[in-house]
Image (cartoon, rainbow, N blue to C red):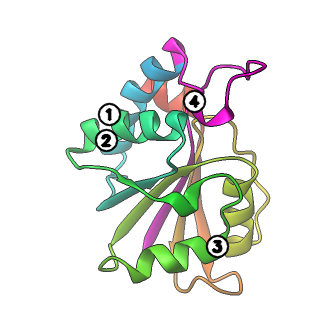
Amino acid sequence: MKLIVMRHGRAESPIQGRPDHERALTPRGVEWLQSQGIAMLRAGLKPDVLACSPYRRARETADLLAAAFGIAPLVVEGLRPGADIEVYAALLEGIDTPATLMTVHHQPDVSAVVYALTGASVPMDEGHAAVIDVRRLAGMGGQLRGLYEAEVMARLG
């Protein structure tokens, strides 16, 4: 299975008194993600399943990418902050194993998942995506195939 682990796009800064889960994408974040979806299609990175955190910025990211991919995103409560590799096992139990699964969620969780699967410590800034070939979800059972930076993908789109 190919796994694309992505951090949500560029989001608003936290505002005192406003819940973190309500933070939206910035206009630049929206613009970049529209182009990123096109670039990902061109690079052959279209997922069969796109799952995201229920937080607004992750849902907006998934919605923009899903529009480019022509699929509907799946909101997964377990992908909220604090998600780990165990969430992926639970997610895969609930669906037919896709050839390519894409997840959109939060830092530091996305870095931790990439590390758990590959042993690679990679920067996962907003909008970055790591592509991993996964043989198994345990014991570094994957191989990092690429790291796609948001700004570079946006320019290619």
Q: Is residue 157 visible?
A: no
How far is disc 2 from disc 1 in space, using C-alphas?
6 Å
Quadrant (top left, top right, bottom left, bottom right) of the N terminus: bottom left
Q: Mark 3 sits on what residue?
A: 85
Q: Is residue 3 above or below residue 141?
A: above
| CA distance for labels 2 and 4 | 32 Å
Judged from the image, the secondary structure of the residue bearing numbered disc 4 is: helix
Q: Which amino acid is tagged 1?
A: Ile
Q: Amino acid at mark 2?
A: Arg
For disc 4, the marked residue is: 22
- Vertical arrangement, residue 21 with respect to residue 35, above or below: below
Q: Earlier in the sequence, mark 3 or mark 4?
A: 4
Q: Is residue 2 left or right of residue 24?
A: left
The residue tagged 2 is: 42
What's the CA distance linking mark 3 and mark 4?
25 Å
| Front-most of residues 25 and 33 | 25
Dot 1 corresponds to which residue? Answer: 38
Q: Which circle's residue, 2 or 4, is located before the other in the chain?
A: 4
Name the side, left or right, on which 19 lies relative to 93. right
Q: Which marked residue is nearer to the observer: mark 4 or mark 1?
A: 4
Q: Secondary structure at mark 2?
A: helix
Give percent across and percent down for residue 83: 66, 62
User: Mark 1 and mark 3 in contact (Cβ < 8 Å)?
Assistant: no
Bin the neighbour count of mark 2 within 10 Å (Cα to Cα): few under 14, some 14-19, many 20 and up. Answer: few
Callout 3: few (<14), some (14-19), or many (20+) C-alpha neighbours within 10 Å?
Answer: some
